[in-house]
Every structure is written in structure tokens, then in C-alpha cells.
Amino acid sequence: MNKIIQLLNEPTAGAHPRQSTIHVSFVLVLLIAAAAIFTNLNGQYLWADEADTAVFARNIVRYGFPLAWDGRTFIDSDRGDRINSHLVMVGTPWVPFYVTAASFALFGESELTARFPFALAGLATVALLYVLVLRVTGNRSAALIAAFLLTMNPQFLLYVRECRHYALNMLMTLVMLAAFLRLPQYPRGVLFVFSTVLLYHVMPLPACANLAVLGTLTLVHPGFAPQRRAFWLRLPIVLSLTLPWLLVSWGEVKKTVTFLPGISEAAARLGQFLIEATVAIPALAWVVL
């Protein structure tokens, strides 16, 4: 780990005889990723959650806000617990809705335009992973392998081809991590604050989880001591730009929050989590990790 931290503050490895080959290979990986992500993107109807995002986006184009009622159609789930008394969506952050609305405003409404900005974020995730691994390891081959493995991951391809927040979660998590690692060089942390706040307004849970992990690392791991001061000084700014949304939405969100009734339910939930985790990462990979 200390070696990784040292590499963060060193220039990327110099020119290598195979450098041009690596660059060509990276472009090839991006082309493969683009083909896998964008091919037949409009081949199927939007499923329930995608349609939820798209309909709220349509109402944003019409009215400027994610309204659940457009005068003819009412859209919601969870027994109406996600909307307030003005029929405005507050139970889910708005960034995915506005991203989709922007696509609709520019290109019109279709399955393709609903999914396009998220697919684009997925492709950007592949590219950013390459850059991040290259920066951390100084090894172009490692960066290329990382980008290729992500491109070949079926779960990744399925998620980034959906009109949902998943691709933005992945992209902004990488931006947040990259900005965190560079805090010693850029102590203002503008990119770190921006990416964290944006990720929160895409989906709060990954933003909070990332903050908890990164904050803990600055306290317990000496290799991340250079990030400590900048991280904790930026945290109040992040909170000031995220907690207001929690205050606005909590009245509705708390209706959907339930505590586990007993150990049996906790065991069932844990089992479900393990199954989903195994789907995302094969059991053998968990053993290796």
C-alpha cells in the first residue's frame, strides 16, 4: 500500500518501447466497449424502473420539475411515498432525471435517447479506470488489463445500458477516488467536493459509503496521512451541499425505511445480499480477494 501511495506522487512511467502498442490496444478496448455498450441500445422497451426515470424526465422537459402528474398520467411506486404534497418527486435524487431530460430535450424521446447518456457514462468509466490504474501503478499493461476486464464484465455492460443511475454511480465513484488520491497535490479539493456532491445527488448510499471508507483510511492508514487535512476540511462543504436534500426528502423517505423485525429476516436479507454479490463477482473471485 505504501508503494501505491508513493507512486501517486511520482510521474507516470516514462516512454516504453511498447508504449505505442499499448495506446493502440487501449483505443481497441474503447472501441470494443463502445460496440458492446451502444449496439442495439434501443432494441427493447424501457423496463419499469427505466420508465420511471424517463417519465419524470419527460415532465422535467415540460414543467421544469420531476412531477408525478402531468394532467393525464400519474407515475409513482411505493404507494406514493416518494412524492410530496405537491406531487414532486423527493424520494429519489434528481440528477438522473435531469440527465435524461437533457437527452430528451436535445434528441427527442425514445428508448435510445433515454439510455444514451448513461451508456456514454459507462464508456467514460472504462476510460477513466484505465487512467486511474495507470496513475496508481505506473504500469500501462495493468491499466489496459483493468479496462479490458471491465469491458468484458456482463454485469457492467447490463447496468450501463440502462436508463438508471448505475452508470453515473460508477463514473462519479472513480472521479471521487481519483480526486481523493490527488488531494495532496490539489488541497483545495474542488474536484473531490464536486464529484462527491454530484454522486450524492445521483444516489446517496454510494456517496456516503465512499466518504466513510476514505475518511477512515485517512485516520488509520499512514499512507493516506497526506490526504487527512484536506479531506476533513472539505467534509463540511460536502455536508452543506448534501444535507439540505436529506432535510427536504426525509419526510417522504422515512416512510419507506423499515427496521428488520427479527433475526430470521436479517438472515434472509444477508442471504439475498450474498447471492447478489456472487452474481456481481464470482465466488472464486471473492476467495482470491
Image: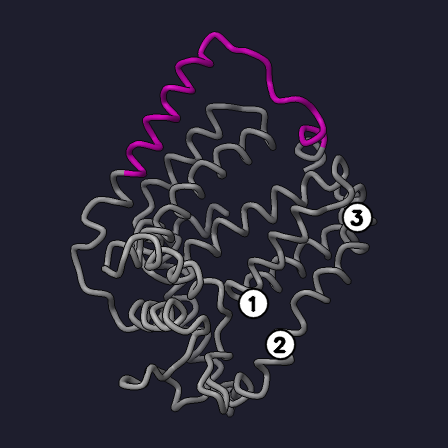
The alpha-carbon separation of the residues under discs 1 and 3 comes to 22 Å
Q: Residue 281 appears at what percent x and percent y?
A: 39, 53
- In the picture shown, does residue 244 fall above or below 149? below
Q: Secondary structure at mark 1?
A: helix
Q: Secondary structure at mark 2?
A: helix
> Is disc 2 in contact with disc 3, using a CB cutoff of under 8 Å?
no
Figure quadrant of residue 236: bottom right
- Percent position (x, y) of residue 183? 73, 42
Label 1 Cα neighbours within 10 Å, binned few <14 / some 14-19 / many ≥20: some
In this view of the protein, can residue 259 be seen by the observer?
no
Question: According to the image, label 3 marks what residue?
Answer: 230
Q: Are marks 1 and 2 in contact (CB under 8 Å)?
A: yes
Q: Determine crowd level at label 2: few under 14, some 14-19, many 20+ residues with C-alpha closer than 10 A.
A: some
The span picked out in magenta is 6-34
Disc on res. 246: 2
State the residue in front, 4 or 236: 236
Instruction: Kindly identify the amino acid type of the residue bearing the numbered disc 1.
Output: Pro
Q: Residue 15, percent across and down?
A: 55, 11
Tell me which residue sits at (47%, 14%) in the image: 19
* Magenta residue check for 13: yes
